[in-house]
Image (cartoon, helix red, strand yellow):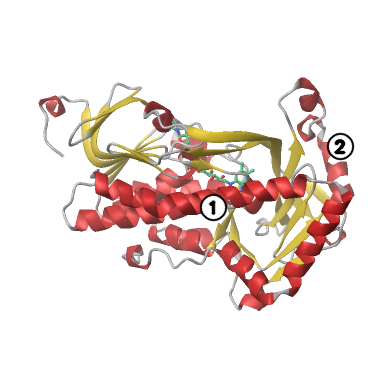
Amino acid sequence: MQNSDAAQKKNILKTQVAIIGGGQSGLTLAAILGRHGINVICVDRDPPALHQSENFDLRTTAISYGSSQVLKAAGVWDILLGDACAIKDIDILDSDSPVLLKFLIDDVQKDAFGWIINNRDMRIALQEEISKQDSVNHIAPDQATAFTAHDDYIEITLASGLTIQADLLVGADGRASFVRKHANIPTRKWPYNQRAVICTLAHEHPHNNVAIEHFKAEGPFAVLPMSDDQDGTYRSSLVWTEEYDGSRYADEHSLMALSDDEFNAELNKRFPKFYGHVRMISQRRAFPLGLEHAVDYIAPRLCLIADAAHGIHPIAGQGLNLGMRDIAALAEILVDAHDRGQDLGAEDLLESYQRKRRFDNMAMAAVTDALVKIFAVSFPPFRAARQLGLKAVDRINPVKRFFMKQAMGTSGLLPNLIKEDKE
Ligand SMILES: Cc1cc2nc3c(=O)[nH]c(=O)nc-3n(C[C@H](O)[C@H](O)[C@H](O)COP(=O)(O)OP(=O)(O)OC[C@H]3O[C@@H](n4cnc5c(N)ncnc54)[C@H](O)[C@@H]3O)c2cc1C
């Protein structure tokens, strides 16, 4: 990046990479780049303490093996693993059928299909990691309000009045991405008229590391195993999808409108009996569901990652896992370019990133979209055919193994970016 006269001014910060958005994806990218000596400024509009607070994001994330490698490259996997819960078996149910498809970890001879991790734990570990890195500057709370790309740098204005000049701007600012909109990158999007109600549950009996995905016409009902509480309480995370069109009627009939006692009673009616009695032990939160995919991931000196580029239905628990694959691809390109002394905002690097990621993300968006639509049909002959299909997958081993591999995300990412921690 060239020195400009303006850069002499006191409130101008210069860096190689400016990341707008310090959620799970922005922080992960910042941590990996920082560990490789790349200068990074990561900006988030929320104070870091808010992201660490108990009730900010009550969700958990199902992390695939591939994503665990990305978090390892970010230096936080060993910390997260301590409280992570391994998924050993996955049960798939459809409507009122018994278990139709069962993925057993013994069939793939691995330790786990993936791990359930608290989003809060991930944010805390990543914030701590970047606070130890000299090359990463975490600016929060502050937010990007404008940016302009020049031939050899991009200039970003923050609400506080600070200006950042960077070789590259990365938009990691989530679904409603300011970066994407300000760069005039259009999206293709549609709503599902569903929302996911999430909370943490305590139950009487252990979950035995089983994840349950129960497809229903109104959307999936997923139960994800969590590690036991400090006092030994058995816990799971619930993602309960309901029809929701934003109307007053929908609000009044929502799971969110139930009292805690009513909600617990509904839960116990539909919960598999092997959990014993179940009760909610956190607040409830609702997330409207839709699909949104950016037409381009890049613009001059700018690229988008994770939800800023693609937001999908959580039906297969793949949203952040896709984001982690973006981070892996981008980090590999940037670290390599940095080692060669190249300009990190060069057009050919950005094109290479887009080529690597767009097809994979579009394919997963299409698969999740198809799953939502296929399982929404309750017409009996169609439902019977669908259940036959699931039973067939259960019996045909190569097909079953294919699905299991997809769930694990074993894509052999990043071995060259993983650095062991120094003592
Ligand atoms: C119910 C539910 C369950 C899910 N379960 C799974 C799962 O099991 N597995 C999985 O892989 N994925 C899952 N996902 C998807 C996953 O949660 C998202 O993909 C992930 O949170 C996206 O992270 P992100 O960092 O890209 O975006 P966000 O988490 O939205 O973070 C964006 C950040 O940008 C900041 N920001 C926004 N605008 C600005 C600005 N102008 N300036 C500065 N900062 C800004 C925000 O404050 C925020 O911190 C689930 C999603 C839902 C809704």
Seen at 77% across and 63% down, the residue is 389
Callout 1: helix, strand or loop?
helix
Q: Which mark is residue 270?
A: none
Mark 2, other Cα within 10 Å: few <14 / some 14–19 / many ≥20: few
Which residue corresponds to mark 1?
363
Camera-side mark, 1 or 2: 1
Q: Is residue 2 left or right of residue 327?
A: left
Q: Quadrant of residue 225?
A: bottom right
Look at the image and tell me whether residue 66 can be seen: yes
Say left or right for 138 vs 48.
left
Q: Which of the two labelled residues, at mark 1 and mark 2, occupies the earlier sequence position?
A: 2
Amino acid at circle 2: Glu
Q: Residue at x 79, y 35 (%)?
A: 255
Question: Residue at left 39%, top 33%?
Answer: 140
Inspect the image, locate mark 1, and give the three-letter code of the amino acid beneath it. Answer: Ala
Give the camera-side residue of 3 and 357: 357
Q: Which residue is mark 2?
A: 262
In percent of width and height, residue 394 lies at 74, 70
